[in-house]
Amino acid sequence: MSNVSLRNVRKTYPGGFEAIKGIDFEIPDGQFCVLVGPSGCGKSTLLRMVAGLETVTSGEIDIGGRVVNEVEPADRDIAMVFQNYALYPHMTVYNNMAYGLRNRGMPKPEIDTRVREAAQILEITTMLDRKPRQLSGGQRQRVAMGRAIVRQPKVFLFDEPLSNLDAKLRVAMRVEIRKLQRRLKTTSIYVTHDQLEAMTLADILVVMNGGQVEQIGNPLEIYRKPATTFVASFIGAPPMNLIPLDGGEIAAQFAGDSRSVAAAGVLGVRPEDLLISTDATATGGIALDLTVEAIERVGPETFVYGSREGAHGVSVNPGELPPGEVIVRIPGQIAPAIGERIRAIAPRDKLHLFSADGRARIDI
Ligand code: ATP
């Protein structure tokens, strides 16, 4: 069994900065866990602690039923894939993949079998005699993965492995990594700041913020029920619209259910859950009167940016929309004109309510 458990893990860097403030979670054997969060939230620190490249200040890291806090990286039975590939430039692809196994004194025939098997899985068999400089970025990344695969580790650790690739290749490699992990069934931890990558790869998604876990769970469940406004605006692009309920006109539309609204300070609605209504008197769960400020046509859908009159509030989270701005996501390319007044409505079951400080979700 290669489950990974983190128990009240903390990291304080020399100098006193607390980068990880007590993290607890468990990754069951064979699952793909993605750590996602903005720059500086501590995701690389946490991954490096699992790898043994950073010391653990307090708490326990357990891999396959063994606490590894004091175990050397080489003895943890993990393999890491980095963003910069970290290939040896003077060695062939074959030797790059074989190097770690030779160092461990593995017999030559077994090394050969493992390298050739990995090369076949990754479709780089024809490149085994080349040097890294003779490969494209995507091919180098495959070699880096090959080097991890041949180890047959208990756990794969990925640190933003696709960041150096162009957008198209990123998508292609993302799909390949997921297929590969399903095939090998190796427990994996993957760090990224890209929420789309996180959503599509994860069995278990861990959203981090300021050295803590903001929410953990199944990606779609997190998308449907974000626990905080931070998660609501971080997961999903364009982000969820967050509207302060300051007792004004928006709050008044909730008059029928005063209990939950009384406790709430922020209303959330995803751009795709808003519909543009031509009926000026239409109301759903919520009705927002907007002036169209900008239109973005991306092909299959169109983003309409509107402003609410008299809206105010303070955006605090990265990726959050400016106060008063609302995005409506509509299919196709037909859009209202700039300057037009529109009414965007959403049914009640598509609305999200949060406490005024954004730290708690309130069930409607
Ligand atoms: P990014 O996506 O930018 O890599 P991250 O979420 O991976 O960000 P970390 O690299 O884990 O973030 O860093 C977390 C915090 O710890 C940051 O505020 C960073 O400045 C700090 N930090 C990282 N390494 C050290 C160090 N060696 N000494 C002191 N502080 C550090």
Image: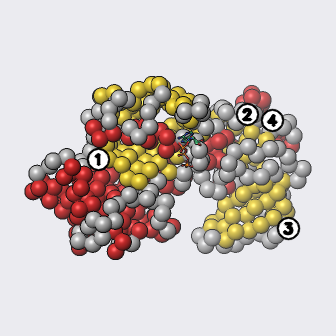
Q: Ligand 1 within 8 A of label 3's CB?
A: no
- State how far apart marks 1 and 2 are (Cα): 40 Å
The residue under the point 43% across, 41% down is 48
Q: What kind of element bears circle 1?
A: loop
Q: Picture quarter containing residue 16?
A: top right
Distance between mark 1 and mark 4 Cα atoms:
51 Å
Residue bearing mark 4: 255
Amino acid, disc 3: Gly
Q: Which mark is drawn over residue 339?
A: 3
- Which residue position is annotated with label 2? 357
Instruction: State which quadrant residue 251 falls in.
Output: top right
Q: Which of 291 and 51 is in front in this view?
A: 51
Instruction: Specify whether residue 263 is in view.
Output: yes
Q: How crowded is mark 3: few (under 14 residues within 10 Å), some or many (20 or more)?
A: few
Q: Name the residue under label 1.
A: 185
Label 2 beta carbon within 8 A of ligand 1: no
Q: Where is residue 105 in the image (x, y as percent from the top left)?
A: 15, 47
